[in-house]
Image: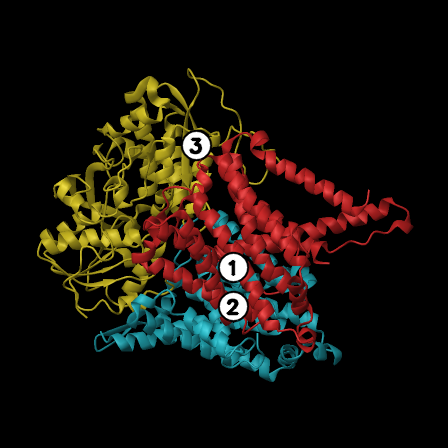
Chain colours: A cyan, B red, C yellow
Amino acid sequence: MNLWLVLAINSITLGGLLFLLSAGFSLIFGLMRIPNLMHGSFFMLGAYMGSTFLAKGFGFWPAALASAASMAVLGGLVERFLLRRLAGQELAQVLLTLGLSFIIADACLMVWTGDPIQPSTPPDLRGAIIRSGLVFPIYRLAIVGVAIAMAIALWLLIDKTRIGAMIRAGVDDAPIARVVGIKVSQLFTLVFCLGAALAAFAGVVGSPYLSIYPGLDAEMLPLALIVVILGGAGSLPGALLGSFIIGFLYNFGQAMFPDLAYVILFVPMVLVLVLRPQGLFGRVAL
Amino acid sequence: MTRSLSTLVASAVALLLLATLPLWLGNTYYINVASQILYWAVFALGLNVLVGWAGLTSLGHAALFAVSGYTAAILVTAGHSHLVGAVAAIAMTVATAAVFAVLALRATGIGFLMITLALGQILWGIAYRWASLTNGDNGINFKTRPQPFGLDLTSAPAFYYLALLVFLAAVASMLVFVRSPLGAALRGTRDQPRRMTALGYNVWLIRFLAFLLSGFWTAVAGLLFLYYNQFISPQIAALQTSAEALLMVISGGTATILGPIAGAAIVVIMKNVVSAYVERWNMVLGIIFVLIISFMPEGLVPGVRRLIGVAWRGMRPAKAVITVRGEASS
Amino acid sequence: MTIQRRTVLKGMAAAGASLGVSAKIASPALAQGAPFKIGLMTVKTGPLAQGGIQMEQGLLTFLKEKNNTLGGRKVELVVADTGGNPAGAKTKAQELVERDKVNVILGPLAAFELLAITDYILQTKTPLIAVAAAEDVTQRKANPYIIRPTTTSAQCCHVMADYALKELKLKRAATISEDFAFGHEQMAGFQRVFEEGGGKVVKKLWPPLVTPDYTPFIAQIGNVDMVFSGFAGSNPVKFMRAYADLGLAAKTPLMGGWTFMDDALLKSLGDEALGVLSGSSYSSAFESESNKRLVAAMAKDYNSLPGGYASGMYIGGMCVESALAIAGDKSTDGTAFAEALHKIKLEESPRGAFTIDARGNAVGAVFVRKCEKKNGQLVNTVVKTYPNVSQFWTYPEDEFLKNPVYSRDYPPAKNLEN
């Protein structure tokens, strides 16, 4: 097996999953300036919900969409009734989102017990591509396809629609956006729903190979943070590129510098933050 | 009764209660819980210097806490005296805090939070991976508590009094700091950094010094943690510990002195005492945080003070309106 | 269940006692004297909860079966949730010893929790029945108050190395396990026996404890006859799927220690686990009377299959019963009870007959199990039983103890290839 080729392909597929995870985080972070520390919880709860929908006989993609929809509702409720009152109070937002993540983590343990759950790969995407001794699972390649489709859909939404234009205005300058009559508060709810839904979708899509277990939330949150730091908050192309950079860094770093396994992602994060606080592609410093 | 008098009386009562606590609390288990509250409170007070008065939210303080504990544990295990261990631990932690500060003070707000988070994760990784130094995840057993001036600290009440003394010193230093020119300047950098620069203050230096002060008390708390548990392992450097300390500060009320103490008490009591009765104590802790933030976004201590103020005004004729002071920060 | 979790409410108001609180009824003293108190240290919240919940279920099953009476003596259980970290373990040990005054502690789950409290256990003379596998607790730093009726980290791995060499005639192995002490000790034990028997460990891979994707590690495995793994918790599930997805399951046999293929994990695994071999001191398929009762009761009460943690605590309960019989009236004396624990010889248990050696670890059978599908369900079928396996394998005890404890660097790996 050609190690480097497998690593390269895997870097791209991991990047795809990371994009699904972090796109919503980037939007929330960029537009609302909310350090949403419950993003990992949306991911994990979404994955659990997906597994339940699957167990109830849903197909894989319908289950992913149903889970995304339910998480959008939850996200909307959280934004509308809890977060909205804390606009601009970063510390209060940190406390609230961390508190909610405690609740969600414990609720998941209660409902789904601690047993790890690993949904089957969707039937159409099972198996592997085998070329000259190289084996690579089809499903992981499919994730890249889903991520790219999602990136295009989000790009169309942000760049080509009226709502997208309002979101962009909100990211660039919320006070001015308000002055010109954009209902920023409704926009915030919408973006938060979208972010939560994207995280849940990513959770379901990732579950056949990440599996679902208590603690998944805390594992995914730092990854989302790193991607967004690297790419720049509020920038979708940044999140996309940041995801792939992290994908490569993770795969090649783990293989080439095993002694640095624990710090391989955080050292670049510090470097970027110190040398270029706005991220590689962001326009606004954090 | 004037405010200052009532504060004085309340402080005296609190001191008396704290000083006699081992006598009326009885069981050593509860005395130990009280000791834990005290050293976590010292940690939270140290973190509060940054979070509250400097407006800089650190999510990497667990690493500083751990640097202190590890330094002392490694040195004392290698045969050095407790005094050398303690002094070196504090020096090492303050030096690490200085490095953190140089890197993290490139940013403010969320950028600062992220840099400290990443730095904390890096130190956690080192504690985990550098097993020849730290003994990896097996941790280091710390055989004996120190015996300052020949005093044996093995028993629960003895350790409690050590923790209480340190805690009172921390509180006193915070009271002095808040009223000092540096404390005032630090609050200025939080609220009006540009104006402070225009007035000729070195904003960076003021924040840097605040970081060192924060690092100092974090180091002291880390030492107490080590002496209390007589064990240290990488878990204590993890993000979860940083988050917990931050939650103590925010839930109790930032930029106050009572707030972080109250926050430490809530978290320690939930984790150690309530968890014995309520299986879903993690959820209850989360709910408490959500409730605090929903009804008292400013934190528990200022929130309660506000509610008492409202109730007080409601009971008295309109002319005697008492303005609610923003605690020691004003 | 109406086991009394807590009877001590001293100093604490029972306020808020509605959310998930179990019954707090003071137990009437049915048997003579005060009840014998058992403290269970487990993990019921956070990432380690799966094993921790199994521990509680296993012990509750035993006590229910005995109607909370062991040897004519009423027992009372106090359950403490450590949260899965060393500081929490220390506090909970204090709670059990100083406040609840338990006579014996069962648990805790993780090695780093056990290591955080060993000195305290010694100081307070509290007998403890461990499930955590840290080697030195029953070896170089043996503690007279601790016994371990399950296994050390390496005990089953010695066996698997022997099996791979002699039964499967495999010569080249790669090892992969989490980069923490439990993983290091397991892999070192495997490596020692495997290389001394003529095999070669040509690759040792150490993914961090938290690894979202094992592919970069699996891709490095290269050309070997077999892979030996020591993953624990939920990681085996993730690892085995990736291993199969990358096409290795079909050509390179996968083996592991007991946590890697714990019976409790079977319901989380899919076909990718078929054929995986594992060494364990317990098998849910083992045909002993007590094991049949355990499996049946766990299925009925909790709809789950007992694994190493549940059976470990069930057996821990049996140890308490046996030591009560040995120590008799002196059972409430910590030192006497700890001595009695060291004299245990159980003829019948869910893991079969076993004894406790001088340093407190079990000597008993280790099963080599193969994962198979029966009636549409995964089971670990026993393919070979090694009787009377000691923690020192076949080495003389004093010679074994002269070496450093197993670690990432000991024994040194001399055959690594790139």
- What residue sits 8% from the left and 57% below the top? C198
Q: Residues within 10 Å of mark 2 (few under 14, many from 20)?
A: many
- What residue sits 45% from the left and 72% below the top? A269
Amino acid type, residue under disc 2 in the picture: Ala
SS of the residue under disc 2: helix
Label 1, on which residue? B215
- What residue sits 56% from the left and 53% below the top? B44
- What residue sits 35% from the left and 39% below the top? C119
- Left or right of C285: which side holds B192? right
Amino acid type, residue under disc 1 in the picture: Gly
Q: Residues within 10 Å of mark 1 (few under 14, many from 20)?
A: many
What is the x, y in percent for residue C69? Answer: 39, 23
* Residue B97 higher or lower than C265, as above or below: below
Res A267 quadrant in image: bottom left
What is the x, y in percent for residue B273? Answer: 53, 39
Q: Quadrant of the N terminus of chain B?
A: top right
Q: Residues within 10 Å of mark 3 (few under 14, many from 20)?
A: many
Q: Is A267 or B197 nearer to us in this picture?
A: B197
* Residue A224 higher or lower than B153, as above or below: below
Q: Is residue B119 visible?
A: yes
SS of the residue under disc 1: helix
Q: Chain of mark 1?
A: B
Label 3, on which residue? C97
Q: Residue B101: which numbered mark, if any?
A: 2
Q: Quadrant of the C terminus of chain B?
A: bottom right
User: Residue lying farthest front?
Assistant: B149
User: Which mark lies nearer to you, 3 or 1?
Assistant: 1
Q: Are marks 3 and 1 in contact (CB under 8 Å)?
A: no
Give the Cα separation between the discs numbered 3 and 1: 35 Å
